Image (tube, helix red, strand yellow):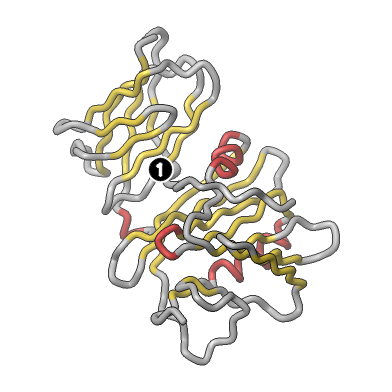
Amino acid sequence: MCRTVWLLLFGAVISWLPFTKQGGPEGVNGIVVSEDGAPIEGVRIFAKHAATTDSVGRFELPGFPTKDSVIYFQKEGFRPKALVVKPGTATMKVTLEDDSKTAWVLPLCESKATTTSPHGYELRFVVPTNLKIRKIKDIDYQEYLVGFASGTGLLQLWWGPLVSPGGTVEDLLLHSATFEERSIRRKSGETVGYDTWGRTHDGTAWRSADFPGLSGSAIYEDVSTEAATAYDRIINSACQFAQVR
């Protein structure tokens, strides 16, 4: 199903080390540390409210969660994280990994590579000619709907200055049995987006690769393992076109 364009910047995901206690109606608080246990200052934390860790890695988010909620953790140099917080969680300890272990560094596009991505954007994908593609163009964005097989969910490729899956991904996180995320970087080291994927409780696959720094996004949801494999090949072919035409 075609999704509405979300004008939001998505970011962050995965493993965490929680401990909970009852009470704490003032909100959720905790500490963020590195893999060696050192506190991390300046981590951006956002959910319904936002916060930043202090010099000893501590934070406090106002508003006690009354239902399952997603909290995101981001800082340059560390792997982004998102975790689903259950009602009753008041305190947590979060460990951030070294981002260099998992970051996806986009290559530059080969000059002779064949792509079906629209011109005028830095982000390009290689889309096999045997897949069905429906192209949609509006004033603010362009979209390609890529079909793997009849009855299978579509891969949505978006281009535009403000396109992002936004709230769609948060909803997928809340209904997933497992999920992971990594940052997406240019070869120069600049973070340009986040790649998030997972499986729902009924076993279907989803993935959202959001490239706000390159004005693009790719997402599929509720598809089989076979379709996910085909769509992942397309997403993984992403490259940065050196000169926008």
Whether residue 212 is situated above or below residue 132 in the rendered picture: above
| Mark 1 crowd level (few <14, some 14–19, many ≥20, 10 Å Cα) | many
Residue 163, given in percent of the width and then of the height, sits at 53, 55
Which element is circle 1 on?
A: strand
**Left-right relation of 28 to 69:** left
Residue 2, given in percent of the width and then of the height, sits at 71, 53
Which residue is at 43% across, 79% downward?
244
**Left-right relation of 163 to 35:** right
Q: Which residue is the site of mark 1?
A: 81
Which residue is at 26% across, 53% downward?
77
Spot the residue most to the right. Answer: 150
Name the kind of residue labelled 1 in the image: Lys
Residue 187, given in percent of the width and then of the height, sits at 33, 72
Which residue is at 40% across, 36% downward?
16
Q: Quadrant of residue 57?
A: top left
**Left-right relation of 206 to 87:** right
Whether residue 153 is situated above or below residue 11 in the rendered picture: below
Spot the residue most to the front. Answer: 139
Q: Nearer the viewer, residue 60 or 227?
A: 60
Q: Nearer the viewer, residue 17 or 170?
A: 170
Residue 94, given in percent of the width and then of the height, sits at 33, 34
